[in-house]
Image (spheres, rainbow, N blue to C red):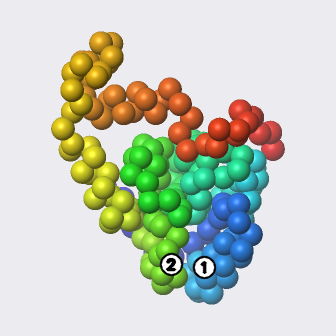
Amino acid sequence: MTEARTFTARDPIRASLLDDHEVVRRGLSDLLDAEPDISVVADAENVAHAWCGAPAVRPHVAVLDVRLPDGDGITVCRELRDRIPELAEPMLTSFDDANALLDAIMAGASGYVLKQIKGSDLVSAVRTVASGQSMLDPATTARLMRSLRAEPAQASEIAPELASLSPRERAMHARARGRAHQPPDAPDAVYVC
């Protein structure tokens, strides 16, 4: 088991931000940069900038919004995880959505917190995920757990080819066929940096 990393003012947590709202990015940057052991090294307003910017500055933590005009933070999480496996990626969202939480966890997110979080709690969440631990919103997590434990749908409502799958496997199959958490008009795009 690896030891939790300790960060200091001389060796701070390098944070990257992704949110399409400038005022949110500025507020997050001011909040995190005010801490002696955290330094915001990049911020992005869209998916293209996140994919190009974060790998270049090698952050320890990337705080990602879930819903973006040109894609979604969950896909960014998955892609950045492939490029920077040690990256901690808490999702920061205004959407209390158990399905998004599950998708984020499956994509490798290390946290999922709602934007109504107190500033001091967000700073703690960044430190928590940077040290290798997870940070999940308790209410959203409880809702997800209830939905995963729910009674399976009636057999007559399930397509025959999916009948042998568990409820969780059916839910994941449904998500795999779609483009979870992307606006309907989001383009299929490849970004070249």
Residue 116 position within the rendered picture, expressed as x and y whole percent measured from the top left: 49, 74
The quarter of the picture where residue 132 lies is bottom left
Residue 63 image label? none
Q: Residue at x 77, y 39 (%)?
A: 191
The quarter of the picture where residue 24 lies is bottom right
Eyeballing the image, is 171 above or below 136?
above
Residue named by callout 1 = 32
**Is residue 121 or residue 180 the one in the foreground?**
180
Question: How many angstroms separate mark 2 from mark 1 (CA)?
Answer: 7 Å
Check disc 1: other Cα within 10 Å, few if <14, some if 14-19, many if 20+: many
Q: Secondary structure at mark 2?
A: helix
Q: Secondary structure at mark 1?
A: helix
Q: Residue at x 66, y 52 (%)?
A: 68
Residue 123 image label? 2
Quadrant for the C terminus, please.
top right
Q: Residue at x 63, y 75 (%)?
A: 28
Whether residue 160 appears in this view of the structure is yes
